[in-house]
Amino acid sequence: MTRATRTPAGAPAALGTPSGPSGAPGTAQGLRVTGTARAAVAARAAVAAGAVRAVALRAATGPRSATADAVLAAAFLAAMLVERVGAAPRIGGAMPAAVLLSAVAAGSLAVRRRAPLAAYLAGSAALSAEALFVLASPVTPYANLVGLYSLGLYATRHRARCGPVIVLLGMAAYFAGASGAYAGIPAGSLFLWLLAWALGYATARRQEERDTARLLIRRRVAAEERTRIARELHDLVGHTLNVMVVQAGAARLVLARDPEETRALLAGLEETGRDALDELDRVLGLLRRTGPPPDGTGLQPGLADLPRLAARTGRAGVAVDLAVDAAAGDLPRTLDVSAYRIVQEALTNTVKHARAGSAAVALRRTAGTLDIVVRDDGRGAAPGYTPGRGLLGIAERVAVFGGTLEHGGGEGGGFLLHVVLPVP
């Protein structure tokens, strides 16, 4: 036997390895595919991060958040005005400017989520001007601290990183104008302000990473579900249509000389179509379910349906010799369905490609494994052949269970497919 493909456990990665004309892995091409895959993953992550950022921004700027920020700004403004009134003798004629700067510093908090960088710039400018030209307020720095935390939490990565620079400039101006009491920037104040920014920035990045991970997981699950649906429909529709095409072609050839044979072929064609419609209805019913299907519902075929599959294949001109071990009937439902689909796809390939007159299907359950062998007497595999969608679909099913797959030319000719699936 010539082994063209062997798929061990964990084979999805191997499926992406390209092969050259002889079926051997193409190293340079494989490296290019790997690099492309990495770039695609990075692109998907960037798109996901952008989508998460947009969702987070909409959530942060909703009506409730805007109301909460307006209340926060009003509370700070009230505290600032009370303090300004108490310091009126020292402020003197600069009171209108002091009130205006307090309004700017407090009002910037009202837009701290929607425009965090602009809000913090306005608040820092008001704080610096207050210390340089009016009188440093003990309340305004706390509003500035909230604005800095908001900058780290709500701004984009690029804009949030401007925070430490603005802090240094703002503190230099504030302490320079704070009645000359400070010769420089106190380390404790600088540490506190940078800590507030770091807390906001780190919280935002962690949340962004969690949201991005959740979004990527949802997209991956959706992609896997689409692949599963495509595989199910390919197995069902591909097999049935191939059988029906062969039956229709045979009926056309004998139409003039053997009406009875034509009638029998057309009856078989009708029966095959009805079986396909019933199975398609079961598959679509499964896909429409909002929850997991209950066990034993029979929404998908299993090994018990192999005789019908063999009869349908026989109507297409390929006699099927079916040998199923009695112990193979007691399998987990997912394994039972997958084993049926593997045999179905193997027989579809026999009808479509092999030009075979007969095929032998053998299923044997041993200790911990299910052994599936499908052999036909057709023309066999061409040298250096490349597996098509059918064989790749079988490989995906086998990889899910951590089994092995071998396919290629048999020792006595024809095509051989051998699958070993672990049985829990």
Image (tube, rainbow, N blue to C red):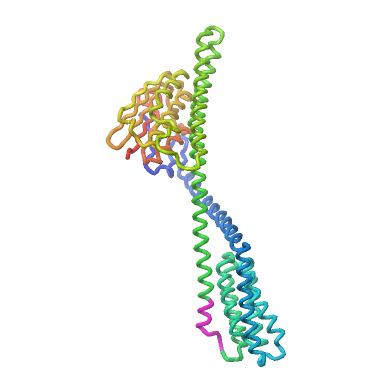
Out of 411 and 223, give the one closest to the viewer.
223
Does residue 149 appear left or right of residue 345 in this picture?
Answer: right
Chief secondary structure of the magenta span? helix
* Image coordinates for residue 33, horizontal then vertical, percent: 50, 46
Q: Where 262 falls versus 108 (above or below)?
A: above
- Which residue lies at the image location 43% right of the left edge and 18% below the top edge? 357
Does residue 131 appear left or right of residue 414 in this picture?
Answer: right
Task: Give the number of marks.
Answer: 0
In the image, farthest residue toward the top: 257
Out of 135 and 289, give the one closest to the viewer.
289
Out of 333 and 73, give the one closest to the viewer.
73
Membership of 67 in magenta stretch: no
* Image coordinates for residue 53, horizontal then vertical, percent: 58, 59
- In the rendered view of the protein, which quadrant contains the N terminus? top left
Range of residues picked out in magenta: 183-193
* Image coordinates for residue 339, horizontal then vertical, percent: 39, 33
Res 362 → quadrant: top left
- In the rendered view of the protein, which quadrant contains the C terminus? top left
Q: Where 18 falls versus 207 (above or below)?
A: above
Q: Where 211 falls versus 132 (above or below)?
A: above
Membership of 188 in magenta stretch: yes
* Image coordinates for residue 316, horizontal then vertical, percent: 47, 19
